[in-house]
Amino acid sequence: RDAWRHFENPDHGIQLAVIDCTMPKMSGPEVYRKIREERIGIPVILVSGYHQDQVLDKISGDRHAYFIKKPFTVDDFLDLVNKSLNRQSPGAPSPHQTRQGE
């Protein structure tokens, strides 16, 4: 809840959301939907060791949504963060590809 209050405050300048798909009170896809209601263009990275196909189905068509499967390397995660923050061109490759660490 504290995180959501920070997210809602435009003065905090949040530019990227990283969400675990399995959380106690609200699932990652639910948080993703709520974020999309508030800020359509903010990049979102969903993280999970499970639910890969279900998550990819939910974010299909959203060029600002990404998924990375656990376990992943720091380099893979940082690459995806950089890609999501630098994505500006409508012709850029689809972000829905799954990234898997070693």
Image (spheres, rainbow, N blue to C red):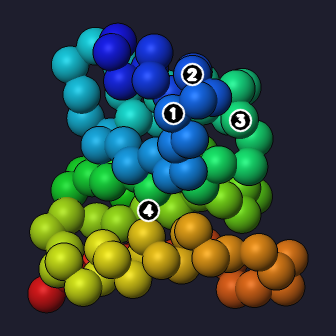
Closest to the camera, between mark 1 and mark 3, is 1
- Image spot of residue 52 (x, y percent): 37, 57
Give the percent coordinates (x, y) of residue 3.
36, 24
Q: Earlier in the sequence, mark 3 or mark 4?
A: 3
Marks 1/2: CA–CA distance: 6 Å
Q: Earlier in the sequence, mark 2 or mark 4?
A: 2
Disc 1 and disc 2 in contact, CB within 8 angstroms = yes
Q: Amino acid at mark 2?
A: Asn
Label 1 close to label 3 by CB (< 8 Å): no
- Amino acid beneath label 1: His
Measure the alpha-carbon separation of dots 3 and 2: 12 Å
Give the CA distance from mark 2 to mark 4.
Answer: 25 Å
Q: Nearer the viewer, mark 4 or mark 1?
A: 1
Mark 1 sits on what residue?
12
Q: Hey, which quadrant is residue 83 in on the image?
A: bottom right
Label 1 packing within 10 angstroms: few (<14), some (14-19), many (20+): few
Quadrant of the frame with the C terminus:
bottom left
Residue where numbered disc 2 is placed = 9
Q: Earlier in the sequence, mark 1 or mark 3?
A: 1
Question: Which residue lies under the disc numbered 3?
Answer: 39
Distance from disc 4 to disc 1, alpha carbons, whole Å, reads 24 Å
